[in-house]
Amino acid sequence: MKKHLLIGTALLVATGAFSQNSARVKPSGIAEIKSRKVDFSETSFSQSSTIFTGPTKQIKHKVNANKIAAATIFTGAMNVFSYLYAQSKPLQYNKALNAVSFLSRKSTTYTPSSNNNSGAIVALYSTNLGTTWNETCMWTNATNLGRFPSGGIYNPPGNTNINNAYMVAHGPCTDGTGWVGVYYASKPITTPGTTTPGADQQFHDANAPILKKHHYTLWSNRIIDGGLVRGMGMIINDINGTTNITYGPRGTAMLKGMFNAGAFVWSVDSFCPPVNVRSDGSRITNEYGMQAWNDNGTVGYVVVLGSRSGTGPTMNGFQPIVYVTTNSGTTWSLLPANDFADPCQFKGVNDRMYSLGSTSVVCANFNGSEDWDVAVDANGQLHIATMAYGHYSNHVDSLNYRNTFTTEQYSYSHTPFDHPTIYDFYTKPSGGWDYHIVDSMGTEGPSGTSGQPGYNTNPWAGASATSKMELLARIQMSRTDDGAKLFYSWTESDSTVVGLKWNIYPDINMKGYDVNAKMVTPRMNITSGVTGADQQAYFHFMSSTAVGASSSCVTIPYTITYNATNNGVAAVDTYYLDGIQVCPSNFSVTPMSPKMACVTSVQNNNSVNYQVMSFPNPADKATTIVVGLQEASNFEVALYSPIGQLVDTYKMNGQVGSNEINIDLSNLSSGIYFYNVKVGASVVTKKLVVQ
């Protein structure tokens, strides 16, 4: 749950393990989408004149050989709301046509016919990678106003001529007071009349559905040459509900558009994951899902975040619930649940599961506050770029308790062992999951809700005096057409310039991953020092497909959107970022993937085999050392300070299996400690980090 979108959040006094500047935050439980769906009509907006009282912006240029060449305005919109969702995928690249496409609501200077209102949807495309653009109207309606467009170029099988292609768009509709349904639109690129939509405009009424009931069709669009146009929507009880139970998220909908005789025939596949329920009866799941496909559309995944039922306390948290197909979507299978809090397999992630609550609770939380994205690699395996941390409690009614730190109420303490971290979790051909760390971030997204962390520092005015625009890292993924190279992007600010840990003057950072060589690129700040983009890379989109073959240098299309006044309800400009290039020689770094050596056994002189581990490690107030014995034996654990002084010893009459020793660290200073485990004549020494 996005921490800064919560309505009515309460701050609770911390106890025990937390400092006086730390507090636990319990969300109200209202679905995250509710506080964002305020963009009904421009007449309902108050032109906020909120004065930004945060730190003064100072441009600080950095040397970066991989930065983009230029940021060029190519379109705009009446306000920034159409660009809020990084997962909507309005920016796409079509390899067969060598064309980039982008979808947006109309700008203030664009006059569609015959319904010139705020709900007109416009498609743009470029056949020279952003040097010049063509635009054409996709949707207009007098009462059903289009919002949040998602889509791109549909290319008929075997076609290589842009003039034979179609633009496709879909998204939700409002009547100015609430959400009333969804729109689907397509148009031949060669159709005359750039301000007039094509003949294929379809409206799906939320109250009288022709298809299966679904809403808010703006997520995760994918278009595969020669295949279906696929988008994602939501399956909920009432799109305008204001509580968990009335809103009623039940699952995610896959939208499938099949081209037929000049128009698209749409159908819906439903995915309702097995999840726990709160005491009020509402299902604990995100209302939207993400999808990813291989290059020919045979292997695909649908990912929903939810509290999976039947998994036990450590797995009650928001985790990926994954469906897979290997026959282009004819049938789908639900992947087994996975324990992402396993300290052996996911050390480096597991360590952070404790930092947000009691050391007796581990409960993985993938419901990241900085967005997440998915992709399929060349081997048909799913990758999820996301943050992962812990819930304070694993109780179904309290899953979103969080800690905050310092008077700024950061979600992380920003110490060496506790900072925002992006992971790539991926499936393995043999089953189960693996991961590596993509990178850490130095800043967090400030809230857009009055009274929430970072709100006063947030420079972007919103639709009212008590709301602002959310400024997330907007974690996104891209891939080469064959999936051999994957790319990650996110935004963060230079905290030495901002003076705080809030992401208010963002630059785009990027890294790449060579799937087969298992090497990553160094971090690249691609907008630093670029006119029009330096510390202004707001509301960025990353194309889900890179330009170029994986065996050579590739470029990746990006856009950013903002205006000079940081006013979310005023007209904004969108910039195309041209020139970022990644070459095979850039993949030169081994990715970080720390794992616990749980399966490494030791044999001593008495022929006793044993295993040793500790968790959490790093630890704060306490840790548990586990000694696994294959036969009963006495053993001793000795803890030493960073300078080698004996802190304490612990002895146990060990039994066959796991033997746990709980060690109180509350009186120890931060630092690197060591502990010896002696079984018979054999001694093993391991490191313990105390935060």
Image (cartoon, helix red, strand yellow):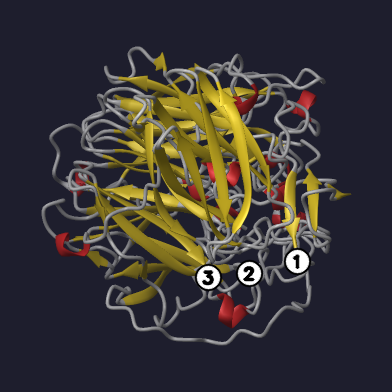
Q: Nearer the viewer, residue 84 or 115?
A: 84
Relative to residue 502, is residue 123 drawn left or right?
A: left
Residue 144 visible, this orientation: no
Q: Earlier in the sequence, mark 1 or mark 2?
A: 1
Q: Amino acid at mark 3?
A: Pro
x then y, percent, for residue 533: 45, 76
x then y, percent, for residue 553: 16, 61
The residue carrying pointer 3 sits among few (fewer than 14), some (14 to 19) or many (20 or more) residues within 10 Å by Cα, namely many
Q: Residue at x 25, y 63 (%)?
A: 129
The image quadrant where one finds the C terminus is bottom right
Circles 3 and 2, Cβ within 8 Å, touching? The answer is no
Displayed quadrant of residue 609: top left
Q: Amino acid at mark 1?
A: Glu
Q: Secondary structure at mark 3?
A: loop
Residue 576 visible, this orientation: yes
Q: Residue at x 26, y 60 (%)?
A: 589
The image quadrant where one finds the N terminus is top right
Circles 1 and 2, Cβ within 8 Å, touching? The answer is yes
Q: Check residue 408 in the rendering and tell me which mark sits there, or answer none.
A: 1
Q: Check residue 506 in the rendering and tell me which mark sits there, or answer none.
A: 3
Mark 1 and mark 2: Cα distance apart in space: 9 Å
Q: Secondary structure at mark 2?
A: loop
Q: Secondary structure at mark 1?
A: loop
Relative to residue 620, is residue 422 drawn left or right?
A: left
Q: Check residue 501 in the rendering and tell me which mark sits there, or answer none.
A: 2
Q: Nearer the viewer, residue 545 or 59?
A: 59
Mark 3 and mark 2: Cα distance apart in space: 12 Å
x then y, percent, for residue 689: 55, 55
Q: Earlier in the sequence, mark 3 or mark 2?
A: 2
The residue carrying pointer 2 sits among few (fewer than 14), some (14 to 19) or many (20 or more) residues within 10 Å by Cα, namely many
